[in-house]
Amino acid sequence: MSYYFGFMHRFSSNWKIFIQNPLGKAGLALLSLFALMAVASFGLHLLGPMYDPMTGVDPVVSRSVGPSTSHWLGTDFIGRDILCQLLEGAKIAFIVGLASAFISIIIGTVVGMVSGYAGGIVDILLMRLADMVMVLPSLVILLIIAALFGQLNIWMIVFLIAILRWPAVARVIRSQTLSLKQRPFIEASRVAGASDIRIIFKHIMPNVLPLAFLYMTFRVTSAILVEASLSFLGFGDPGQISWGMMLQWVWSSGHMFQAPYWLLPPGICISLLTLSFYMVGRAMDEVLDPRLRREGQ
Amino acid sequence: MALLTVDNLTVGYDSATGMTRAVDDVSFTIESGTSLGFVGESGCGKTTIGMALMGLLPDNARILHGNIILDDQNLIKISQEDFREIRGRKIAMIFQAAMNALNPVVRVGDQVAEMITTHQTAVSPVEISVKIEELFDLVGIPGDRINDYPHQYSGGMKQRAIIAMALACNPRLIIADEPTTALDVVVQDQILKEIIKIQNLLDTGFVFISHDIAVVARVCEKICVMYDGKIVETGTREEVFQAPVHPYTRQLLGSYLTLDNCNNIKVPYINSRLGQKGWEHGCALAPLCDNPMDKCDRLCPGWRQLSPTHGVRCFKKSTI
Amino acid sequence: MNRIVFISKKAVELFILFFLILTVLFFLFRLAPGDPVTRMVDPMLTPEDAAHIIEQMGLDKPLTTQYMIYVKNFFTGNFGFSFHYGEPVARVIMARLPCTLLLFTTSTLLAALAGVFLGKISAWKKGSRMDGVLSISALVCHTLFVPWFALMMLWMLGFQVGWFPLGGIISPELWIEDAPFGLKVLDVIHHMILPLLTLFIIHVGSYLLLMRSSMLSVLKEDYILTARAKGLTDRVIRNRHAAKNAALPVVTSVGLSLAFSINGGALTEQIFTWPGIGRELIFAVSNNDYPLAQGCFLLIAAVVLSANFIVDLLYAWLDPRIHY
Amino acid sequence: MKKQQNAIIELADISKIYYQKSQLFHTGAGDVVALKDINLTINKGEIFGLVGQSGSGKTTAGRLLVKLENPTRGEIYLKGAPVSGLKGRELKEYRKQVQMIFQDPYQSLNPHLSIAETVMEPLIVHGAGTRESRRQKVLDTLETTGLVPATDFYDRYPHRLSGGQRQRVAIARAIVLEPEFIVADEPSSMLDATIAIQLFQVLLNIRERLGMTFLFITHNLAAAKYLCDRIAVIQNGVIVETGHTRDVIDHPSHPYTKTLIASQPSFDICPIL
């Protein structure tokens, strides 16, 4: 219980520094905007079947036209509303980014703590594995898997990205754990008779969690980008509209030089959303104890 | 004319709670060929004085007040570029070797040579290598170690190399900030002997900064005792060590363990309060004083000169 | 002696890693739903040709034998036949490799040099307006969505302004005609500028950010204070004492960020129809040309691993403190 | 001085070698011999000083005693019982009796735990007492180490404390289980002289009140003289001289001890102090 208070105490004082940081403020503002978009996508069915991002075709248009009063951002090549697709895409981006980052952070943190604390052969094996996975280009792997196993659904994609993206986290957490392990307060706890499990979860975890959260923001960014690239190349989940897929439609239907109203919004959204997560991460990075960062490298 | 005169130097740090004074109204002078020691516990502002003299205060620190006059030149008033010219050439600094004070990827000899090439443009490479050999010989590093990297040196040798670097341009003033801290007693003893030898050899002014009064006692003729940014007592070595007036000086001396005094150590009053009191409301040392007066909690004691060289910041008249 | 031990250790590590990747790929191809034979043998072949390939790859033999043949084939450079081209995969990808290496190494080197230089300036002037502009632009570059950005470049500089061709590596008329060599080179450069610029802008940001943070932590080191106390000029402190040390960690991260760069490289090749390995891989995957996909993938893995090896060697050579 | 001649800790022929790793062929060239054939006996109730420079192996000796590391050769006895093979329950039981105070008070407290949690951890780990009794025990222990009033410190976090106060918290954590034997590894080397002397006073008080035995590891001969009943001088992993503190310092026999004594800082103090 008092651990909780300690955490909150630190959290609130860090929050004050964080919110003074212009990067953090701008990033948070942008993030809230995208979150609003994602929430708004749940209300699309209220507008009627014509505004369904996947199946809703405007019978009057049935082709790509520019912005109008009934379609604020215009329509795509079969007459679907671009704004609705954009809102739906925000939802998918958040799901993909957060879910996959969360999984890779959990894997990375556990592997990093175990590897660093256990040392020896466990450490060597886990870190060699991490090295191997780390140098693999995730998009290329996903392409090969998509080729072999056919269309991947969105949860499969989330899971695969997470599986390919934990090593960087594990490395940072491991080096942090290694330096913590040498700290006398861990040794003091061992001398006091504490078990390894207690030391890992009571002493090491609270000290590495801030770093794990920091890395989560970066993982969100890379997950969103990889999913969007995959969709752009036509290997995304065909049942879900994502921003990458919107770009794929612009490109493959040959509208990229004719329909800037269609080309611009999804690209800007992807870039801005990843930018805002990144800005939040950078701001957190500056708030966290600088010593944490140094040892993390 | 003194080599260095510091008048009413006040340095403040910007912090979350406003401006805090690390050095508060400090004045002293140094003649050529003499040495002055600053002694005090961690956080008393002694390192800040050294950095102010070097013009190397961190970005969040500012000189609020005062003058630093070296050879008729007021260092507070000169430009950054002029100050850079002075650093290394007229004022050199000996850092603590336990710090990462040498660049790990540059050979030690090159790091010393750099000092010379920066300040003396008309020297040939041969002259430089001769000069470096002389310097390394002076501080006692074997000549075949000149081209090693710092990680190949022991702690004592790094300290010697740093001293060699400081001497490279024959500076007028050398500031030594905890030069022997973190060295073993035996090595510390060797380094101190080296420094005393150099003091006798050269006509340089020394400013010595240390938390260890025994070190200061060995190398300095004049001593300033500091507490929380202010000098509380200053005098010659004999005055401060033989006839200390300020209760804090007496406490520092009385609690310092040597092999000879283990039986008559005075244990200072244990103060378990959180944080320091500061000088705004009375004497900062009142909570630590074994016999404070009533006014100590209300008024900040002024400076009293007991002799031309001996001064103290305390209300108490008697020495006992 | 130590250096040789270190290098051979790294080389052995590299070899084992590559072997693992090779093995995993083998099992992925056999485990995937569907008949492995149809995946490795072009459905358009005559039965006799098909039987020959099945024989050659041992597809009718037990898994262990297949694996042995697979490994042997790999080391003798036999990657099978591409369905689409009807040519040996090795010949197809070897024709693509120079294009990729040309684009990729040029953009990586340029971006690394510029990024390190700008990162150094940015960290040195921390808090200034220039630092603000540089680091915000670096952030934007780093988080740009590659295909979209490439499309924008194509649309604006290729389509709207018409300064650059819309794709390919060389104009067809120059390729066919026996044009003078110099003209060919100029034409390739003309074709390369857009993809190069795209990759450069995407990568320069991350190198800038890396160098900046590395430099900032070096500037807090005590030996920088020593250098200032020596009265060295700002330029000497910045270049000789800070930047040299700060660039070391950047070197390592070049290797680690290669995976990231390859994703971007493949997408860029795809959009600018640059005839490289990445584009070939995407093409192979889209057209179910499995032998070609496998070949491209293994080549990319080999490139990534050897680049990491080079980075390790470089680091060992640069840092005198390294323990072999 | 009253001396009970019953040994509490014995080191018999202890050696510790750190083998050079990451070599293709083991040549033994890079191996570091931290301790070589150490024999020591520490008696109940005494403060035993282990004096040496950095790198002499004195810290390694302390770490072996609290079983943070294991000796390469030799055996340690606690009250006559060998401790080398202890595992699980027995090791936990051993840790109840042997505790340690670390050198750096800025590193030895977990910044995420309050003072109460830090000091209480040994009690929780060993399942000692009830919730209420533990709280009382922690408060009492904090008072013993001079952190008064203890309630002021109970819920604080280490970052608000000075070095001396942190080190007292570390002492409280070491003595809260009332162990028989405490290894104090240079507890004062990071502290100012006036604070250090107060800390020594705390250690002396604890010995007085709780009858604990200490191994005091230090590089400072004067501090050893002030605190210790007996000392051993260690150089490069070998004990060169051992005996009653006064005998060793007043009549050193080994040349290294003489050098050490000659290099000790000293100054003429005013007669009135």
Image (cartoon, rainbow, N blue to C red):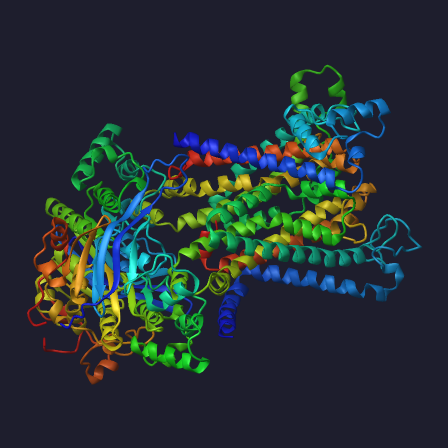
Task: Compare residues D208 and D78 and report the one nearer the observer.
Answer: D78
Instruction: Work out whether D218 lies above or below A222.
Output: below
In the drawing, does residue A166 fall left or right of residue B301? right
Give the residue at x 18% y 48%.
Answer: B191
Task: Compare residues A1 and C22 and report the one nearer the observer.
Answer: C22
Instruction: Work out whether D89 lies above or below A278.
Output: below
Give the residue at x 56% y 49%.
Answer: A168
The reply to whether residue A87 is in sight is: yes
Picture coordinates of residue A25, whole percent (x, y): 58, 62
Task: Say which quadrant the C terminus of chain D sits in.
Answer: bottom left
Task: Compare residues C33 and B45 and report the one nearer the observer.
Answer: C33
Give the residue at x 29% y 66%.
Answer: D182
Task: Compare residues B251 and D202 and report the one nearer the observer.
Answer: D202
In the drawing, does residue D126 fall left or right of residue B222? right
Picture coordinates of residue C10, whole percent (x, y): 49, 34
The reply to whether residue C189 is in sight is: no
In the drawing, does residue D141 fall left or right of residue C11? left
Instruction: Work out whether B122 lies above or below C236.
Output: above
Picture coordinates of residue A49, whole percent (x, y): 89, 61
Picture coordinates of residue C184, whole percent (x, y): 68, 21
Q: How many marks?
A: 0
